[in-house]
Image (spheres, rainbow, N blue to C red):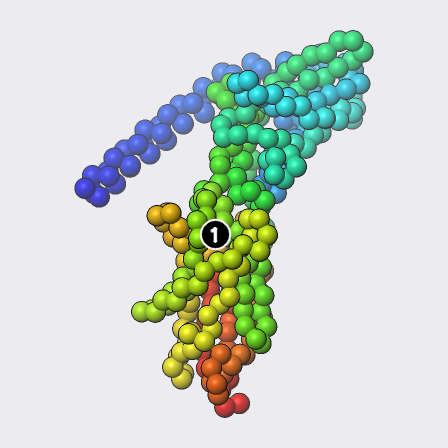
Amino acid sequence: MSRVRRRLGAARRGVRARFGAVRLRVMTRFFLPRRESGTAVLRYAALLDGQTLNLHAVLPTSVKAADSAEILVRRRGSRHRVPATVYESGGRLLMDAAVLFGEQAGGLPVGRGRWKLRLRVGAGKKSRRMPLLLRELPAPTGGPTGAMSVSPVTGDRYRVGRTLRGDARVVCSKASPAAEVANVHSAHSGVELDLYLFGVRAARPVAEFVAAGQSVERPLSETVPGLWRVEVPLSEMVPDSGRRVHWDVMVHPGGGKRPLRLARRLHDVRDPGKVFGMRRITVAPQRERLMVVEPRYTPAGNFRLTCSREAEGK
């Protein structure tokens, strides 16, 4: 059965790839060249922080003046307006705007789906609406950081896309189930973890600390709405002398939902293990037994605790 599913999945991906290639050829060869003169052409469109859309566009030459401007964001019966700035440079009118998405973050209360973008410019009593034409999709940047694809506040995903005619739009997807590290409190008396749960409703959640052949569970307590805390059970994680034991953390939301691996992924860095470094501490979780605890992140962003008794006897 798994082999059949893999073949079906590969066939679907092949069909989507061929359709996408045909769609791109139609867009670039037919629609884009014919529409540039009558639309606002985007020179820049990107979501750098996972939830704020930054726009920079050149207005068509037919627009001679503008004393007001705004971005219209709409989907079906929902419409939102965000102020934009129009100014002259090099004999052309240019537009800049920043659109914040997500009501919880103080932005637009947009739901799941594809949201169309339009620019409205006004001059005196007259106004004009026009599409925002997107020639190319945002390309990934190099360096130690990159554009975030997920809101750090809600876990929702916002992606810049375009229609078959080349009009820019934003595709919103609700948060996938995830357990995200908020803070790590390390002291010689112990370690506490703060975390958020996204895309899932918690019902008496439990944190499970898992190592090779070992498992320890601890309940989570909600310190403030949406923020959960757990005390790491260090007394039950002491390894044999000379061993290093790696502990991962699985969060069980409850209600029969699948467990979530505790991680830190809502960021824009490419190597979280190096950037979000944490200090190692020496604790005495059991009488006369010292243990070194090293909290860290794996290259994939998973949270891990490495415990050893290397400091004993020093």
Residue nearer the viewer, 259 or 163:
259
User: Taking the image as drawn, is residue 181 in sight?
Assistant: no
Q: Position of residue 57 (x, y in %)?
A: 67, 26
Q: Residue furthest top?
A: 125
Identify the amino acid type marked 1: Ala
Between 232 and 38, the residue placed more toward the observer is 232
As rendered, which of 125 and 259 lies closer to the eye?
259
Residue 200 placement, left or right of 46: left
Identify the residue at image location x=22%, y=43%. 2
Residue found 48% across the figure and 55% down from its top: 263
Image vertical order of residue 33 relative to residue 106, above or below: above
State the residue at coordinates (68%, 33%): 98
Front in this rendered view, residue 90 or 152: 152
In the picture of the structure, the residue carrying the numbered disc 1 is: 179
User: Among all residues in the image, which is located at the extreme bottom?
Assistant: 313
Residue 295 seen from this side: yes
Name which residue lies at 70% across and 22% down: 70
On the image, the x and y values in percent for residue 122 come to 75, 15
71 to the left or right of 1: right
Q: Position of residue 53 (x, y in %)?
A: 62, 34
- In this view, 298 is above or below 96: below
